[in-house]
Image (cartoon, rainbow, N blue to C red):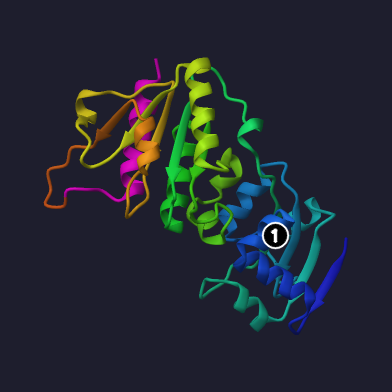
Amino acid sequence: MPKLTISTENSEFQIIRALKLNRTKRHQSGEAFVEGIESIKQIAQTDMEITRIITPNIEALSSWSKDLIRSYRNAKIIQMDNELYKSICDREEPSEIVVTVKFKSLSLEELHLPPNPFLLVFDRPSDFGNLGSLIRSANSFGVDAILITGHGVDIYDPKVIRSSLGSVFHSTIITAPSIQEFEDWVAAQKRMNGLNIVGTDSTGETSLLNHPLRRPIAVILGNEAKGMSVALKNLCDDVVSIPVSGVVNSLNVACAGSIILWDVYRNSQN
């Protein structure tokens, strides 16, 4: 089991920091930086490869972390100077370990959907917390795949992973390469699976109260500030709104999306 002690900033430290901060480096290496015990526990329930287990004190680790080290015999075990360790952690009181993990990016062509599919499409997500929360909701309510369109935050950013509570590692998530390829793919899915495309907007003319949503469906959520793009809105068979009675006339996209996903889940149980 390879072990390494880092007391000053060296090349290995720079790699770890780049995986945390640099989207391009993450996707070039196919590795993500993961902070938070719950997220690490979720990785341990998959067949994903943990490549590094990093701690400020190997001897002081809990029995759970020591068992994790024994389970990933090919991972580098890195003991890092306490101040260096704190510098790569976001929390004031860091957890006893952080890890790096290998991930594989899927393409639209590699996505194999079940009959009667349930998809979530998020257009240009700009907030780490919103994206992570929606990945968590999608996992809870049986979404088969999440598709990201346009340029948005990285699904493997540590903030997204943490806010998803690690559900990103149990989810099929694909970034569409271009809107044209996405449109072509949607057209094919409509022919093959009878996919209904439902957009969401606070000004949508169809109320969720009067229009229960069911599989097969792709729910489209727009960017937090700008809503759905014109191209995506033109793909929609319906645009639904969630009726509200408070002073504020719209909901946060993670809240609204979760309500919509729950509606599909509830109506698709029979």
Residue at 41% in and 53% down: 130
The amino acid type, in three-letter code, at marker 1 is: Thr
* Image-based side of 101 in relation to 251, left or right: right
Residue 208 within the magenta-colored segment of the rendering: no
Foreground residue among 158 and 105? 105
Quadrant in the picture for the N terminus: bottom right
Residue at 56% in and 54% down: 38
Placement of 245 over or under 161, stated as above or below: above
Quadrant in the picture for the C terminus: top left
Placement of 82 over or under 165, stated as above or below: below
Q: Quadrant of residue 266?
A: top left
Q: Which residues are magenta?
A: 249-270
Could you tell me residue 29's position as x and y percent?
Answer: 74, 57
Could you tell me residue 28's position as x and y percent?
Answer: 71, 57
Placement of 210 over or under 34, stated as above or below: above
For numbered disc 1, what is the local secondary structure?
strand
Q: Which residue is mark 1?
A: 100
Main structural element of the magenta stretch: helix, strand or loop? helix
CA neighbours of label 1 inside 10 A, class few (<14), some (14 to 19), many (20+)? many
Q: Number of marks in the image?
A: 1
Could you tell me residue 104's position as x and y percent?
Answer: 69, 45
Foreground residue among 164 and 113? 113
Placement of 13 over or under 246, stated as above or below: below
Residue 263 within the magenta-colored segment of the rendering: yes
Q: Quadrant of residue 32?
A: bottom right
